[in-house]
Image (tube, rainbow, N blue to C red):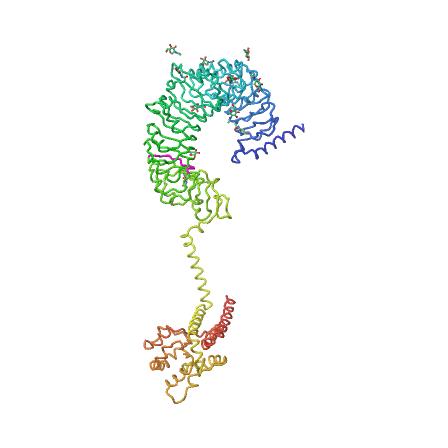
Amino acid sequence: MSTQRARVSLVTRTIAVVLLLNVDCTAEKEEDFEIKLCATHCGLRELSPGMFDNTPLLKVLNMSSNELSFIPDLSLKQLKILDLSNNLYTSYRIPSSFGYLTHLGTLSLGSIAAASVDYDDFEPLTNVSLHHLILGAGTQWRKYESGSLAKIKLLQKISLHASFCENFTMFENFLIDLNKTQAKSLRFISLFPDNCSVSGDPFKHLRTMPFIKNLTVENTWINSSFMEVFLKNVWLSPLYDISFVNITYNEDTPDGFQFHTINHTINLNSITFNGVNHYQYRYPTINMSFKAFSKLTDLKFSGTGMNILPCGVISTLPSLKTLDLSDNLLSESGFWWAHCPYSSAFPKLQHLYLSKNRFSSLSLISLKMKEIRTLVSLDLSFNSLVLDGDCSWSHQLIELSLGSNNLGNDVFKYLSSAFERINLSKTGITAVTQEDLSRFPRLTYLKLSSNSIQVLPEDLNMPSLINLFVDQNAITSISREALAGLPGLKTLNAGRNPFFCSCESYWLVTEFNKSLLMDWPLDYACSSPPSLAGRSLSEYKTSRLSCEAWLQAALALPVVIVVAAVVSLVFYKCDGIWYSKMLWVWIRMKRRGKQRCNKLNNLTFGYHAFISYSHQDSGWVDSQLVPSLEGSGFSLCVHERDFVPGEWIIDNIINCVESSYKTLFILSKHFVQSEWCNYELFFAQHRAISVQQDSLVFILLEPIPTDSLPKKFLKLRSLLRQQTYLEWPRDERKQQFFWANLKSMLHVADKSVVMKEVAEAISDTVHLLTDQV
Ligand SMILES: *[C@@H]1O[C@H](CO)[C@@H](O)[C@H](O)[C@H]1NC(C)=O
Ligand SMILES: *[C@@H]1O[C@H](CO)[C@@H](O)[C@H](O)[C@H]1NC(C)=O
Ligand SMILES: *[C@@H]1O[C@H](CO)[C@@H](O)[C@H](O)[C@H]1NC(C)=O
Ligand SMILES: *[C@@H]1O[C@H](CO)[C@@H](O)[C@H](O)[C@H]1NC(C)=O
Ligand SMILES: *[C@@H]1O[C@H](CO)[C@@H](O)[C@H](O)[C@H]1NC(C)=O
Ligand SMILES: *[C@@H]1O[C@H](CO)[C@@H](O)[C@H](O)[C@H]1NC(C)=O
Ligand SMILES: *[C@@H]1O[C@H](CO)[C@@H](O)[C@H](O)[C@H]1NC(C)=O
Ligand SMILES: *[C@@H]1O[C@H](CO)[C@@H](O)[C@H](O)[C@H]1NC(C)=O
Ligand SMILES: *[C@@H]1O[C@H](CO)[C@@H](O)[C@H](O)[C@H]1NC(C)=O
Ligand SMILES: *[C@@H]1O[C@H](CO)[C@@H](O)[C@H](O)[C@H]1NC(C)=O
Ligand SMILES: *[C@@H]1O[C@H](CO)[C@@H](O)[C@H](O)[C@H]1NC(C)=O
Ligand SMILES: *[C@@H]1O[C@H](CO)[C@@H](O)[C@H](O)[C@H]1NC(C)=O
């Protein structure tokens, strides 16, 4: 009992592991695990009865390629698809529980150990509406009990993967049983073993099986002798569709395939040869009349090595709508074989597939295709086409595929303006222009995948375009402007391009409607910047702010205003205006000082400065200015103190000014009112001095707005406007700065000293300033 339990848990664990490992058939979404379980190739020998108790909703169960020794009991009522093929059970006996799998549509059974089918094997499936039964493991059966398959009355389609040889009684019984089901479609895989010489007529019942419409023979060796017998049954049967897939054809009759005794119309709508290996390594001899195929609409000869189209095909198939000759060895001369006379080429042909052949001349093809008046679509992909001259296409041809031909950027000039669907993937295009694309006003589908296009033109105007493919190119971003000209676009594939994960891609990532992007997000990755290379574009996060200039401006403006306001407030609070004025004074002074430095070096002055002030301001001059300057070693000529008594005040002024390096005016309302008149006179007399205005220094003891000065003091007004002046600060800390500035003005001759002093003063002040903030 305990070993049994251990085994079950082991099995369960194995399945869990397989769920994670088997990429081929695991569910794509996590929630799908509920309904799809894939446990292949894991050596399961048996399943415990309660194994699927927890997953009653399972819809798909694939346990192929295991070692199950009997078909397990399953009671998964929701099951739709069950694959138990390639296991090791010895019989096809279906457990009775399958009778309750009312939703079962597809059942796949196969075991190399099961070589017989017994009468009761499929009994439980009697009332199950099985759509498709896949039966067998490719081995020869020893026994088939007549009537067993007939039990599955609702069967629609069967794929038999078993072989028969010599005694075909079993196979014939199998067909008779199928006739009792609702099977419409038969598929026989590896029907005859390679070493089997088929004699007799195993398919003779086909003629009287009215329900069978489709028949496929796959992976089988077929002799021309058998083919003749087989096809005779097919011609006489009600079959619509016959397909030969991956057959090896052996011409064992001396004249090849001869078939010319058809007396009635053949029902076939569709004939397919998809993959024919020629045992003789040459194209077979086929002698048959195509006249009887009046109902044939679809004909496919693909992968058959055909290099010359049989003569009758081109003109004698009155209903043919679709002809697929892909993957052959046809060229222009083989397709329009010179020895085949024809009056009308393919009277009803609409779709012609010529991909993977050896066509080369696009101009010749365009010309010849005009003969097929009904042709709507043409596939010329995977050929060796060159643009060898002007092309002229018929007007009803609206779909053309030129994929995988090396054509280049000029290809657009060789196409028709009537085209509605164009496939130009992998055609060596490096650039497209609006002019190229404006040739096609009706274009709805354009495929430009796998080229080297770097940008989509921004001036596109293709209102009819619905599907656009530009995947696998060299596009780094897709702009709003480029897609603005495509208002009808419903799908866009643009994956596997080297996207720049920067603002260029911002619009695509955030704003573009992703339901239009068919390959989003899996195929979109960043290629640049290097730090993001390889990351998914959908994970590229950037802010709207960092990418939109107007938004930046809009958001930045209030910030700038606030910052400016705060700075101004701080500036104002800390007397920033005053400091900047002082700095400005200093800068100007330095500049001027430089110019005059040399000149002044040679001159000698009696005083560093003449100080002119109103006697009402003498308190400040005596207590602050004079001590401060004279304490620093400046010699001053002070009005009143140093004036020569008895001389006219103007002469005194002139003497003092002339023997001083600078003249300091201590300006206040008193000075302006009481003293300025003297200076007006002074300036009137000494125009020369007024030219050298920068020897004048104004110190404002109190604010005197220029405009408040009486009009008569024109000179003062203009001097104050042009001249820098120093304001006397009430704040003690600022006074330090004031003195430094003032002293440096008197010091100009010795630049380095000045610089040092001012620098010190500024650093002191700044230090104080920051302390305060
Ligand atoms: C079951 O899985 C195998 C691969 O292991 C796959 O080939 C097969 O098609 C699957 N069967 C069904 C019904 O999907
Ligand atoms: C199938 O249904 C019929 C009646 O509808 C019933 O008689 C028969 O027993 C059923 N067979 C199985 C195997 O369930
Ligand atoms: C063919 O096989 C069936 C049984 O499947 C048998 O009855 C019959 O005699 C065999 N015929 C020949 C010619 O061996
Ligand atoms: C198939 O069934 C039809 C009637 O449904 C019958 O006329 C015909 O003879 C049967 N064919 C075979 C091969 O049993
Ligand atoms: C064909 O070859 C298989 C082995 O490959 C053999 O079992 C079988 O008997 C052979 N059949 C004939 C008719 O020779
Ligand atoms: C085809 O014919 C050859 C003889 O030409 C024969 O040996 C071979 O067994 C036949 N194969 C089939 C599948 O009929
Ligand atoms: C039978 O053939 C027709 C025509 O080729 C096709 O449309 C149809 O899907 C086929 N049916 C089945 C069940 O394969
Ligand atoms: C084609 O058929 C042969 C046997 O006739 C088989 O060995 C081969 O695997 C088949 N190829 C494909 C692609 O199915
Ligand atoms: C093709 O068949 C016709 C009879 O329909 C016959 O006259 C002609 O000789 C055959 N051609 C070849 C090359 O076998
Ligand atoms: C062709 O049909 C006619 C009668 O319509 C008949 O006499 C003749 O034998 C048939 N030929 C063949 C080869 O079936
Ligand atoms: C377009 O052409 C390519 C070959 O370059 C081909 O793989 C693809 O299937 C074609 N697409 C369509 C829709 O025809
Ligand atoms: C995105 O496109 C789909 C399909 O074209 C449409 O249904 C949906 O409304 C669109 N979404 C937006 C946000 O435009």
Give the magenta-colored segment's residue range.
418-427
Position in image of residue 118 (x %, y %): 56, 16
Q: Is residue 711 above or below residue 362?
A: below
Q: Which residue sits furthest right?
A: 2
Q: Is residue 421 magenta?
A: yes
Judge from the rendering whether residue 19 lies leftward or rightward of residue 623; answer left or right.
right
Find residue 585 and report its horizontal and vertical position in percent.
43, 72
| Residue 611 position (above or below residue 513) | below
> Residue 469, image x and y in percent?
42, 38
Q: Is 524 on the left or on the right of 337, as rendered?
A: right
Q: Quadrant of residue 241?
A: top left
Residue 494: x, y in percent?
43, 40
Magenta stretch, main secondary structure class: loop
Is residue 139 found inside the magenta-colored segment of the image? no
The residue located at (47%, 47%) in the rendering is 501
Task: Choose between 496 and 415: the one closer to the eye.
Answer: 415
Q: Quick check: which quadrant has ligand 3?
A: top right
Name the quarter where the N terminus is drawn.
top right
